[in-house]
Image: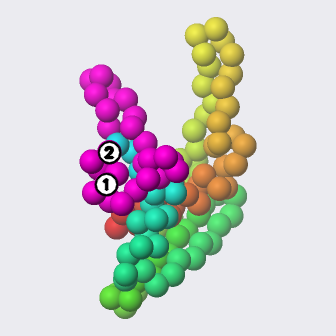
Amino acid sequence: LIVANQYGLNPWTKEIYAFPDKQNGIVPVVGVDGWSRIINENQQFDGMDFEQDNESCTCRIYRKDRNHPICVTEWMDECRREPFKTREGREITGPWQSHPKRMLRHKAMIQCARL
């Protein structure tokens, strides 16, 4: 909750999650809704656009204090997660199978915002 408060993110609306790490601790993870809030609440934010096809998605974020946009391209073959199997052999699918273009767009937006 300290990290959520520090960034003004709401854990109840899935803007930030507590995720278990490999050392039995907890790591805060900002979700796409949290990144959207961080981007939109930045006073220098001046818009965002995307170019997307089946192989890639490019995000451009425009800022009032910069002459050129921040530009990031993410590639489907580098980002897509394959379904995984449980110990019983049952296949588990997720949003990368049901909404791959949306997930790639989210990935491009988040990576662009980080720069």
The answer to whether 46 is drawn above or below residue 79 in the figure is below
38 over 66 or under it: above or below: above
Q: Give the residue displayed 67% in from the left and 55% down from the top.
A: 101
Magenta span has 2? yes
Indicate the quadrant containing the C terminus: top left, top right, bottom left or bottom right: bottom left
Q: Disc 1 residue type?
A: Asn
Check the image and report above or below for 71 versus 4. Answer: below
Disc 1 target residue: 5
Image quarter of the N terminus? top left
Q: Is residue 102 visible?
A: yes
Q: Secondary structure at mark 1?
A: helix
Residue linked to disc 2: 1
The spot of residue 13 in percent (x, y) is: 52, 50
Q: Are marks 1 and 2 in contact (CB under 8 Å)?
A: yes
For residue 70, say whether it is visible.
Answer: no
On screen, residue 24 versus residue 17, left or right, reads left
Residue 97 image point, x, y percent: 69, 40
Going by the numbered disc 2, the residue's amino acid type is Leu
Q: Residue at x 59, y 55 (%)?
A: 104
Distance CA(mark 1)–CA(mark 2): 6 Å
Specify start and end residues of the magenta stretch as a single range: 1-27
Q: How many C-alpha atoms fall within 10 Å of the one at disc 1: few (<14), some, or many (≥20)?
A: few
In percent of width and height, residue 69 lies at 43, 82
Residue 55 point in image, percent of width and height? 64, 57
Is 95 on the left or on the right of 13, as rendered? right
